[in-house]
Amino acid sequence: ENNQTFITIADTGIGIPEETQNRIFDPFFTTKGVQSTGLGMSISYGIISRHKGTILVDSTEGKGTIFTINLPFSDTKTKNEIELEQCHQEQKKAKILVIEDEKEVRQLLHDILMSGGHEVEVASNGKEGLRLFQAKEFDLVFTDLGMPEISGWQVAETIKGINKTIPVAVITGWNVELEESEMKEKGVNLIAHKPFEVNKIFELVQEGMAL
């Protein structure tokens, strides 16, 4: 309709309370407790928005929910898309290792970095990540800070023990404030705060490549 595609997904379930509808696309917001990361809807929202589309929710408690996705057709690239491509082409490309135990966060960071033209390998825990690091060459490592068994601090220290020139960025949703001397002692060069901002991640990569 009018050079736009509309996709409607509806159910006849219990519906969504109004206060939840207002936050449903917020990163890390969830009503499911600790078993959920709260990233599914925000990732969907981000993908649709990057394609110049919209996603709307209409729900009545006790009757059901309707999601409407609107995606425009496009034959030509916008000025912003061309400028973004040129910016990506000018930036240094890196081989990056992402170590993150939460699948959705791992996939999100992988997709962001890939969209910037970087080569990305992922690992779901510290042990797997260190094995990959020893088997392949990387320019930069992103590692989650709070992982079971092997923490991000331990990953950073081990990587620096293998190759002290490789920049390490820790991923954290906590309000981490570290002095430069403390970061150096732990083998950490950069901090990637959750929720991620695409441009901030790209800037972090370039900062790491310049070290």
Image: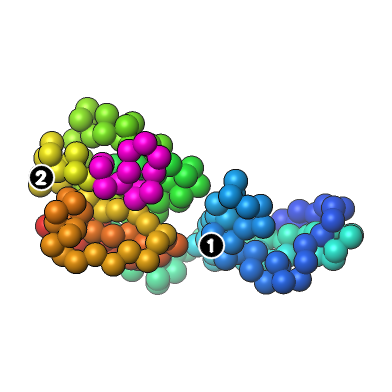
Q: Position of residue 132 (x, y in %)?
A: 27, 31
Which residue is drawn at the image coordinates 67% and 57% (left, top)? Answer: 31
Dot 1 surroundings within 10 Å: few (below 14), some, or many (20 or more)? Answer: some
Q: Position of residue 41 (x, y in %)?
A: 61, 57
> Which quadrant does the N terminus fall into?
bottom right
In the rendered image, is residue 91 in sight?
no
> In terms of sequence position, does the residue under pointer 2 or pointer 1 come before the other?
1
Which residue is drawn at the image coordinates 60% and 46% (left, top)? Answer: 35
Q: Secondary structure at mark 2?
A: loop
* Amino acid type for the residue under numbered disc 1: Pro
* Amino acid type for the residue under numbered disc 2: Lys
**Residue 42 sits in quarter:** bottom right
Q: Position of residue 92 (x, y in %)?
A: 20, 55
Q: CA distance from mark 2 to mark 1?
A: 34 Å
- Relative to 35, say whether 133 is above or below: above
Residue picked out by circle 2: 164
Q: Which residues are magenta?
A: 144-155
Does residue 114 belong to the magenta stretch? no
Residue picked out by circle 1: 27
